[in-house]
Image (cartoon, rainbow, N blue to C red):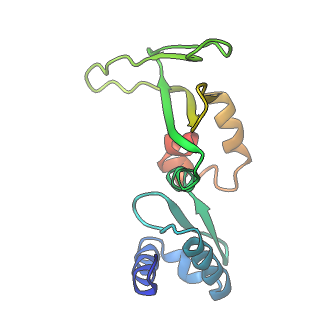
Amino acid sequence: GITAERMTRVVLTAMNKTPKLLECTKESLWESVLNCASLGLFPDALGRAYLVPYGRDCQLIIGYKGLVDLAYRSDRIASIQLVVVRQGDFFKREPLAMPPIQHIIKEAEGDAFRLMTHVYSVVYLKGCANPSVDVMSKREVDEIKARSKTSGSGPWKTDYEEMAKK
């Protein structure tokens, strides 16, 4: 369902936003664009997919929103929730309880920024009463970030919580 014209416009916009893509090899850029199209994703402002230059190679990085889109295309997923827990929130995990997570979000007070403490996902499968739940602490997220090639730049710098959700 992706026309060549639309994908071309989206890729040209990505190149305007990230001029280093122009330094990538044509082959790596072409492969990334084809992979993106084959998945039915766009490297656009919605954050579903990104064309990322690594030296002279372009790499397709699927964002968490793209992963959620792909999961919903399955006939098995009923609902997916990705949630950030912040300092001051009430948060309790009891793996054998239903629901396994209790999270009460503290209302923001003024412009005070509350730091992330955890991130979690709740996935409901069709036909299953109990959800699949995964919780990660900020420390666990930071350990993954430290292993990333772009831990000091890119989305880890500009969109930390979005990367944590991924």
Q: Nearer the viewer, residue 26 or 67?
A: 67
Q: Residue 153: in sight, yes or no?
A: no
Is there any visible trace of residue 150 in the rendered image? yes
Instruction: Say which quarter of the image contains residue 24.
Output: bottom right
Q: Residue furthest left?
A: 110
- The number of callouts visible is 0
Identify the image quadrant of the C terminus.
top right
Please report the residue visible at 47 percent of the width from the left and 49 percent of the height from the top. 158
Vertical order, 124 against 41 (above or below): above
Camera-nearest residue between 128 and 87? 128
Above or below: residue 90 compared with residue 22:
above
Residue 117 is situated, as x and y percent measured from the top left of the image, at 55, 24
In front here: 123 or 128?
128
**At which x and y percent is residue 128?**
61, 31
Q: Quadrant of residue 144?
A: top right
Residue found at the far front of this picture:
127
Q: Residue at x 64, y 36 (%)?
A: 141
The spot of residue 162 in percent (x, y) is 50, 44
In-front residue for pair 156/59: 59
Please tell me in which quadrant of the rendered image residue 28 appears: bottom right
- The location of residue 106, given as percent across then percent down, is 37, 16
| Residue 147, placed above or below residue 132 | below
